[in-house]
């Protein structure tokens, strides 16, 4: 089978399409026929070697964290999922391939309302949005929430989930993403390419979910928008503590949570969460996807199909 790997860190040209044997699942694993993986910018950073200090990986490293696929074989100790089940998960690589093994406990049922390949957009971005909105910001009904960077892969899910919690959502998005973010439910959109967010938000917000790498001046501009007692949650740059100690600034790293993934699947099937794939690429073009991502030329969720 074909698998996309890098044998050394470097620019996107290090991605190789190797021919390897179809892997055998271990006792607590399943073998998946991969329907799709999706692009997450952190994988490009890992490939480039930017995360060597934080997350060292052994080489060659097989790309593809998100997976949507069909179970075609199970290890001796696995009862769920079963052969034929459609599942999604966030793996430690290996889904940029025709087949992938996955620990059974990391897999949740795939939504049935959307094509299986589109469901590959859900795991990491959906979990990050879920944890930002519910675990860290603890958004509740009636709050005003600003999602900074709503045009990205996580942003659409964050807008949806904050709306689901009953919040009023203000979102920053550029012209290429504004309509999509509006469809996801944003009440008000600020075009960050023409307007400073600090000038556009007049009344303080309860919560900011930050999904953009920001420098100190932009971080301070954001903090100034939060009401005393409010929260700013960042999935990117740690936001420095506010001079007003009543504002909580939190940075978090997404954790694997199969129950949350299953809850996301249920919300997709109920029509509460939409999965909008902006573009899909064949696996052979994965290096181009990394280049486009690193140039800032991708938006929303992009899937890669073997
Ligand atoms: N903490 C964690 O564990 C964790 C987990 C996953 C991801 N992350 C990080 O979270 C960030 C977002 O991830 P993602 O997958 O959503 O990224 P992404 O899809 O690559 O986000 C790209 C989007 O960012 C928007 N953007 C760029 N500059 C902006 C600005 N100045 N203001 C507002 N929006 C801007 C663009 O929106 P337009 O299309 O509207 O121009 C673009 O579509 C990344 O830095 C990623 O590495 C962290």
Image (tube, rainbow, N blue to C red):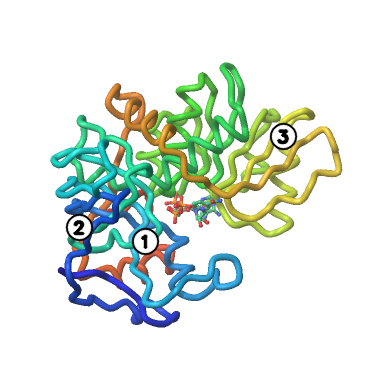
Q: Nearer the viewer, mark 1 or mark 3?
A: 1
Residue 212's disc number? none
Disc 2 residue crowd, few under 14, some 14–19, many 20+, Cα 10 Å? many
Vertical order, 206 against 151 (above or below) = above
Element type where label 3 sits in the image:
strand
Element type where label 1 sits in the image:
loop
Vertical order, 213 against 181 (above or below) = below
Distance from Cα at disc 1 to Cα at disc 3: 37 Å
Give the quarter of the image for residue 180.
top left
Residue 93's disc number? 1
Give the quarter of the image for residue 262.
top left
Coordinates of residue 49 in the picture (x, y in percent): 50, 75
Question: Quick check: is the Cβ at mark 1 less than 8 Å away from ligand 1?
Answer: no
Distance from Cα at disc 2 to Cα at disc 3: 41 Å
Residue at point 17%, 65% (across, down):
22
Coordinates of residue 109 in the picture (x, y in percent): 27, 35
Q: Which residue is mark 3?
A: 226
Q: Nearer the viewer, mark 2 or mark 3?
A: 2
User: Of the residues under marks 1 and 3, which one precedes in the sequence?
Assistant: 1
Give the quarter of the image for residue 143.
top right
Residue at point 20%, 31% (across, down):
112
Task: Please tell me which residue lies in front, 66 or 206.
Answer: 66
Find out whether the residues at labels 2 and 3 contact each other: C-beta distance under 8 Å.
no
Question: Quick check: is the Cβ at mark 2 less than 8 Å away from ligand 1?
Answer: no
Q: Is residue 192 left or right of residue 182?
A: right
Q: Which residue is mark 2?
A: 305
Task: Give the residue furthest to the front.
Answer: 76
Disc 3 residue crowd, few under 14, some 14–19, many 20+, Cα 10 Å? many
Distance from Cα at disc 1 to Cα at disc 2: 15 Å
Q: Is residue 192 left or right of residue 100?
A: right
């Amino acid at each position: 089978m074909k698998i996309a790997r890098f044998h050394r860190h470097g620019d996107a040209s290090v991605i190789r399409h190797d021919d390897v044997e179809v892997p055998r699942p271990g006792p607590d694993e399943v073998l998946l026929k991969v329907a799709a993986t999706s692009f997450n910018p952190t994988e490009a950073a890992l490939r480039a070697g930017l995360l060597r200090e934080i997350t060292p990986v052994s080489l060659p490293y097989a790309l593809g964290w998100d997976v949507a696929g069909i179970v075609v074989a199970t290890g001796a100790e696995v009862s769920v999922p079963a052969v034929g089940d459609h599942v999604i998960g966030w793996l430690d690589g290996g889904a940029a391939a025709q087949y992938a093994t996955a620990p059974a406990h990391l897999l949740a049922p795939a939504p049935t309302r959307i094509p299986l390949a589109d469901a590959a957009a859900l795991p990491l971005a959906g979990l990050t949005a879920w944890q930002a909105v519910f675990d860290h910001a603890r958004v509740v009904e009636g709050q005003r929430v600003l999602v900074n960077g709503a045009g990205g892969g996580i942003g659409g899910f964050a807008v949806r989930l904050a709306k689901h919690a009953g919040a009023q959502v203000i979102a920053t998005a550029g012209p290429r993403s504004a309509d999509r973010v509006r469809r996801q439910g944003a009440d008000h959109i600020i075009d960050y390419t023409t307007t400073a967010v600090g000038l556009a938000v007049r009344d303080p917000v309860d919560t900011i979910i930050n999904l953009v790498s920001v420098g100190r001046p932009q971080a301070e501009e954001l903090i100034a928008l939060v009401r005393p007692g409010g929260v700013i949650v960042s999935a990117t740059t740690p936001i420095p503590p506010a001079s007003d100690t009543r504002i909580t600034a939190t940075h978090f790293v997404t954790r694997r949570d199969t129950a949350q993934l299953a809850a996301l699947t249920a919300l997709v099937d109920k029509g509460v969460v939409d999965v909008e794939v902006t573009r899909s690429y064949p696996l052979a073009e994965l290096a181009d996807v990394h280049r486009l991502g690193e140039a800032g030329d991708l938006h929303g969720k992009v899937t890669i199909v073997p």
